[in-house]
Structure formats: structure tokens, C-alpha cells
Image: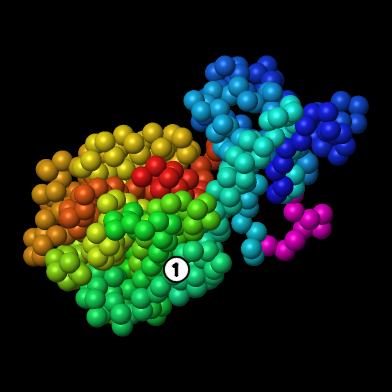
Amino acid sequence: MRIWVIARKKFKGRGFARVFFDKKIIKSRLIFNNKEKILEIKTPEKEKINQRQAVLIARQIIVLAKKYGVKKIALDWRKIKDFGFKNKKDIAKVLAVNFEMANYEFIKYKKVPRGGWNFVEEVVFITEDGESADLTREIKKGQLTGKHVNKARELSNTPGGEMTPELLAGEIKKSAKNTKVKVKILEEADMRKLSMGAVLGVARGSMEKPKFIILEYAGKREKNPIVLIGKGVTFDSGGLNLKPDDNMNEMHRDMSGGAAVAFAVILAAKMGIKKRIVGLIPAVENMPSGESLRPNDILKSMSGKTIEVQNTDAEGRVILADALTYAERYNPRLVIDVATLTGASLITLGEKASVIISKDEKLIENVKKLGEESGDYVWPLPLWEEYEKEVKGVFADVCNLRNQGNTKYAGSILGGAFLYEFAKKFPKWLHIDMGSRDHASYDEFLSKGAAGAPVRLLIKLLEEY
């Protein structure tokens, strides 16, 4: 999609549908004024439009255009520059991000329809003289971000049979080509040498060999980098604790955290962010077989701590334990892990936000703020000492579920508490449970499938920290 800027006096308008905003209409619609197409978008009163609403308005414009086969859209900058953003220069960037996100669909396995795809091809902002340069710069930033969110969505949407650990590693390597990101893949033998018993234990039930994907970007010479860790379970059957039928058909997206981390690092490199950044993605399949991890098996992790596996379907935290320990070699100043860790996050927050957990209250408040600014919304849950006691193992050092009573209680919190057992050496650590945001919800004007969370939040974090 081309998004560009033109001075008002130079715009001819031929072939473009204009966009108007109206608080009085019942719903958004396409109308005709003589031969001119007009997309009328239902909005609140202009002074009440905040950033959250602006995100949905931007997407709604694209969705409505696609519905009616409109390929070219013209927006009057005067009508949108007063949307309620704290920083006015962010408007064009946020609109561009969300135009790209709303225009995306997963069509990899579909036959091209007779009339072609209904994607919007052009969006033009009509401006006054002297506004073009600043707008163009922000639009380019927004488009770049939106495209990388969509790249993460593309990986997450790909069926598990086409996105094994090996294929995931290959796709990430290919995506990092011609950037300053160096990609290294640890094979099964490398992991054995490093005593990554947690990753290897989860992986052993599958014919597909595990991969440990490392992305390194040195935008600046720094002793203490930021490390991002993403869960890369390319298909999660639950293992021997097999998932029910209706819970398994979307488990190819259980590597969404890994996809988000990969494209956040690649995007940081393309944006030229002056930071040293490392991405770590343990990639496995969790499958049932005669070789599978059994309930109540005990694994020895890279840290030396032993893990009591009460349930093989709580495997994400197990592989992340080794990734957190591996991160120690970088002496990071900040570690963030991202995972579709629990279904409990969906029960807690619905489809609107990801759970965040940390011991650092200042970090939590900053991440909440950046979530609002980016559009990847988050909300914190507590990590009290009482919760730490509930992940102590009975027969091992730690266990991967609650050690007594109902294991469904405090599901997201105890997932975070488990990970904290392996993160205590870091000066700053934050856990993002995106189990509630791996898919687009019905009312956010995105195509069905992966939502691309939290790429936008991660890039904001990388810029700020």
C-alpha cells in the first residue's frame, strides 16, 4: 500500500474516494455525490476522539474501503490533525501503522479471486503547504512498523505443519537478511552441551528437532544489552496431557511471542535504534509420543534447578526457563519475556490486553504508558511472595503448576511466578503473557487470525530504554 502526502492545491481527486467523519450517522457507509465516492465514517465528537478511538477509526476506514472495493482513499489532514493525541506528530504515524494492519489478510494458501484481492492500494493525505515533510517522515515510520507487525502475523498464522522449529528458524534468518541483525541457531547437540534440559525435555516427544534462535543487533556498543525472549512453541498439542479438540485448532499460534520478538529486533535494526539488543527464541513442538515428557517427570534446567512437570501442557514456561538462564551471559540491563503462556490471561482480561508481571513497579507503570501509546495494551497482575511459595516443587526445586489445591487458581500469576524463579539475577525483568492477544478480537477491525501483539509495544520499549 502506498501512503503519501500532497498539497491541497495540487490534488486532482480523480479515482480517489474521499473520507468524511460524521457523528450523526447510524453506521459507517459508502455514498455517492454525483460520481464521487465518499466513505462516511461514524465517529464520536471530534474533541472526544482519543488515541484508542483513532486507532479503530483508522482501521475502520480501510475495512470499509475493502468491503466496497475502493482502492484509493483521500484524507483531509485538517479533519484529523485535531484528534486527541497528546503528541500531535504521532497522529500520522499511528494512522499509518493501523492502515497497514487493517489492510492485511492471511491469503498464503488461497486462490486469487476472479476480480483480484480487495486490498487498498493508495492512501493520500491532503495537506497545506509546508506540512508535507514532517508528515511524510512520520508516515514512513508508521508504515515500517505496521509492515513488521504483519510479518509477525504472517508467521503466527502459518499452519504448524508449515512452521516447524526448523522452518521458523529459516524464516527468521531470511527476514534478517540485509539488516545488521546476526542470527545464530543452536542445534540439539549445542543445547545438550549447554545442559538445556528444560527445552530438550519438552521437545523430545516430537519428530521435529528443537532450535534455539539467537538474534543479535549492535546498534550501539553497550556492555549491558536489552534481551527479549519469545516463546516459540510451533505447535502445542498439550503433549501427553492432550488438549481438548476445541482448544487445539489454533495452537499453531503458540509461537506468537517468538514471532513478535524476532520482528521487533529486525524492526529495531531497520529503524536504526541506537541500542544493543538480543532476541532469544526457544523453538519446539509439544507432541505426544512414546518419547514424550510424562506428567510428574523431573527435568534439570540449564540453571541447575530441577523442574517438576505436573502437567505437560504448561510447557511454555519450562522452555523459557532455559532461555532466561541463557540470557545471563549477556549481563542484560533489562529482560522482557513474551509468551502465549496461559489461557488464564484471556479469562482475566478478555481479548483487550496482555498481562504484565514484574517486581519493578516503575517499570510496570512505564510499560502501561507505552502500551497506551503503541496500541498494544497491557495490565499488571501482582507478584507477591505468597505466590512464589505456590510454585515451589514437592519433589523438585520448582513445579510448573500450583503445588497444591486447584491448579487453575491464579493461572497467569503463577506462570509469572515460575519464570521469576529463573529471572532473579536480572536488574530489571518483565513478563508479558499475551495469551489473551495472540488473535484479533471481533471488534478491532482486523482480519481473523493473529493480531501481531506486542510488536508495537516492544519497539516502543526499545526506543525508550
Tell me if I can see residue 39 in this picture: no
Q: Is residue 117 magenta?
A: yes
Residue sitting at 24 percent across and 36 percent down? 361
Front residue of 358/246: it is 358
Q: Position of residue 134 (x, y in %)?
A: 63, 35
Image quadrant of residue 142? top right
Looking at the image, is 120 positioned above or below residue 166?
above
At label 1, which amino acid type do we have?
Answer: Lys
Front residue of 348/428: it is 428
Front residue of 77/293: it is 77
Q: Position of residue 201 (x, y in %)?
A: 26, 73
Looking at the image, is 117 positioned above or below residue 76?
below
Q: Position of residue 5 (x, y in %)?
A: 73, 37
Image quadrant of residue 295? bottom left
The answer to whether residue 69 is left or right of residue 218 is: right
Residue topped by disc 1:
182
Q: Position of residue 331 (x, y in %)?
A: 24, 59
The kind of secondary structure the magenta stretch mainly shows is loop
Residue sitting at 17 percent across and 71 percent down? 300
Q: What quarter of the picture does the C terminus occupy?
A: top left
Image quadrant of residue 63? top right
Q: How is the image coloured?
A: rainbow
> Magenta residues?
110-118
The answer to whether residue 276 is left or right of residue 172 is: left
Tell me if I can see residue 158 in this picture: yes
The answer to whether residue 101 is left or right of residue 428 is: right
